[in-house]
Amino acid sequence: MQINIHKAEIKDAEAISAIWGVVCAERIYTAVNHPFTPQQERNYIAFLSDREGIFLAEVNDNIVGFQSLDLWGKYTDSFDHIGVLGTIIHPEWRRKGIGRYLMKYTLNFARTKSYEKIIIYVRAGNDGAQAFYCSLGFTPKGVLTRQVKIDGQYDDEIFMELFL
Ligand SMILES: CC(C)(COP(=O)(O)OP(=O)(O)OC[C@H]1O[C@@H](n2cnc3c(N)ncnc32)[C@H](O)[C@@H]1OP(=O)(O)O)[C@@H](O)C(=O)NCCC(=O)NCCS
């Protein structure tokens, strides 16, 4: 399987929003419970700095998943060495090595942009994602209790880190 990765441009907003729609409908994996609209994605992409991005995985010219890298905090430069990452793969394309491939690409990008550490928040009920991040070297560091509330149901969030 040939996987191509490229940094999202504004024209990719529709495809990204469509994948959010599918994964949000699953309800259990992400704290994002309403998909970002194409317009929200266009605005988001337009305002990313050159140290940030959404990296798209394409198979046979179809976008099948993506990983985002954002600065942890923009209100002080004391966080400039920390990035926060998220990964979303379309259900039909999971467990085929696409997340691992994206991670290699994104972490290489992060190294070239002088990040020193990457942080991830994962819903406590999302065992698969925790296993995914652990398999790639992330270490669980703690639990935020009742951090997510969707349809009246709470979930905790685990935060994880990886030093580059
Ligand atoms: C979690 C997710 C990003 C993983 O991406 P993926 O492309 O399916 O993962 P890969 O195929 O690259 O898996 C790499 C390794 O991670 C681990 N892994 C991945 N998914 C796993 C799962 N569901 N259960 C256990 N281990 C898992 C395995 O060690 C796997 O290697 P292996 O298949 O050779 O055993 C993807 O399943 C997804 O998008 N899930 C829904 C959204 C989500 O939970 N996002 C994370 C929110 S922070």
Image (cartoon, rainbow, N blue to C red):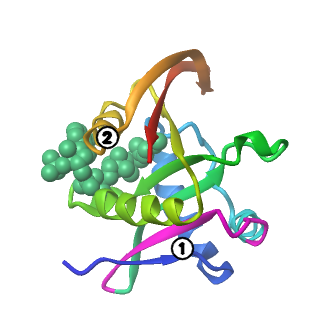
Closer to the camera, 144 or 36? 144
On screen, residue 134 versus residue 46, left or right, reads left
Vertical placement of residue 61 versus 122, above or below: below
The residue under label 1 is 15
User: Can you give x and y, in whole percent of width and height, for residue 90 in the image?
Assistant: 38, 60
Of the numbered discs 2 and 1, the one sitting upstream in the chain is 1
Q: Which residues are magenta?
A: 46-60
On screen, residue 114 versus residue 96, left or right, reads right
Give the structural element (helix, strand or loop) at label 1.
Answer: helix
**Label 2: how many Cα within 10 Å (few below 14, some 14–19, many 20+):** few
Vertical placement of residue 80 versus 151, above or below: below
Residue, x 62% and y 24% (percent of image)? Answer: 149
In the displayed orientation, state which residue is furthest to the bottom: 61
Amino acid on which disc 1 is placed: Ala
The residue under label 2 is 137
Give the structural element (helix, strand or loop) at label 2.
Answer: loop
Is residue 91 a member of the stretch shown in magenta?
no
Amino acid on which disc 2 is placed: Gly
Closer to the camera, 61 or 134? 134
Q: Name the disc covering residue 65, or none.
A: none
In the displayed orientation, state which residue is furthest to the right: 75
User: Can you give x and y, in whole percent of width and height, for residue 44 in the image?
Assistant: 73, 63
Residue, x 58% and y 75% (percent of image)? Answer: 8
Where the N terminus falls, by quadrant? Answer: bottom left
User: Can you give x and y, in whole percent of width and height, for residue 49 in the image?
Assistant: 73, 66
Q: CA distance from mark 2 to mark 1?
A: 29 Å
User: Can you give x and y, in whole percent of width and height, for residue 42 in the image?
Assistant: 73, 71
User: Quarter of the image holding residue 163?
Assistant: top left
Is residue 52 a member of the stretch shown in magenta?
yes
